[in-house]
Amino acid sequence: MGFTVFRSCMTVLICLFLLMLFLVPSAYLDRFCADANAYIDAAEAALLSGDLPAAAPHCAALFSLVRERMPVLERFLNHASIDALDAAVAVADCAVRANDAGAAAEALREAQSILVRIRGIELFSWNSLL
Amino acid sequence: MLTLFLRAVFLDLFVLLILRLTGKRQVSDLQPYDLLMTLIIADLASTAIADTDIPLLYSVVPILALYLVQQLLAKLCLKSSLMRRIICGTPQILILDGVLQEKIMRRTNYTVRDLLDNLRSKDIFDVGEVAYAILETNGTLSVLEKAAFQVPNKQELNLPPGSAALSHLLILEGKIQKSGLDTLHLSRTEVERILKEHGLALKNVFFAQMNGDGDLHIQLDRSHQSRVYSIPAA
């Protein structure tokens, strides 16, 4: 009797834990992707207009955002993809500071594609399921 | 390295908890599905132990999902005999009234050699002694011998039935076991008195067990040549 009650309680707790895992990381990733994309868009817009100094604060903010959120993201995402994002953002930041608009734009595009990929891991889709 | 060590400890304890929650104690209890689940859990756990690039949740979530599915199927099997037949299968009669069921044996991929092997493991060396043999869903073989070959029991031989009570451990390595005393409704003083009556000291007793009739089986430790005493109930 005691074990059966314990097992039932554990099963309920496991269900709640899984439900939390379905919702919380996804919400966190949504917010992170929205913030990161906003910085990327702003930096790309500045690069397109040829205003490298205007792109620098956006790239720096993007770099610090990724660094700040990395420890949490690594709890539920493959470390390799997070490391790749970090590397791409670091390249973009360095390139802007070195006044290399081409390299910065390429690194930002790379960062954006990685964001789409890591969002795809967490977001349910038939493609990722199959 | 410490990370690997701690991940291994965490996942080991986690898998232990999950396997205990499933309620299965040994491999022979397992239905094929349960065995498969256990193997998948082991594989998932080992992946996250060895690869620190993978978050622990990548192993924990699938293991919890498998546990929930297993619990759901177990509940369905309890509630519905149809589900039980689909998931666990049904026992198959391999020998019916002394006759080997060739069609069923072919269907279950059970050869005559397999059958003879399993009968021998049950101390039956002649298939002619078997009335019924049933292949259970967990792969074990249950056998009912023909009446002429069955061992007669005490009731059939009109013998006194004797006690069917369990024996309990009273002393282990010179220490009286409280659980044994409680079950047998004995006191420490009574045990010491019995030992004293037979010239034995508690500290020299390696092992002592008392059965339901009150018969005491004692073995002394190695320093006393592991002598064995059988003391009948007073």
Image (spheres, coloured by chain):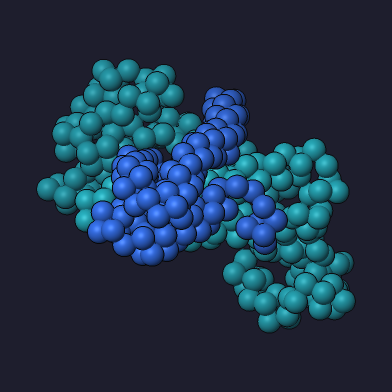
Determine if residue A109 is in view: yes
Residue at the image position 57 percent from the left and 35 percent from the top: A23
Residue at the image position 80 percent from the left and 69 percent from the top: B94
Instruction: Give how far across and how far down residue B144 sits, in percent.
Output: 75, 60
Q: Nearer the viewer, residue B134 or B151?
A: B134
Residue B49, above or below A17: below
Q: Nearer the viewer, residue B167 or A110?
A: A110
Determine which quarter of the picture holds residue B4: bottom left
Query: What color is chain A drawn in?
Result: blue
Residue B127, above or below B160: below
Question: Hey, which residue is sitting farthest front in the picture?
Answer: A50
Instruction: Give how far across and how far down residue B186 sits, in percent.
Output: 37, 20
- Residue A19 located left or right of residue A95: right
Residue B36, above or below A27: below
Residue at the image position 80 percent from the left and 63 percent from the top: B92
Q: Which chain is cyan?
A: B
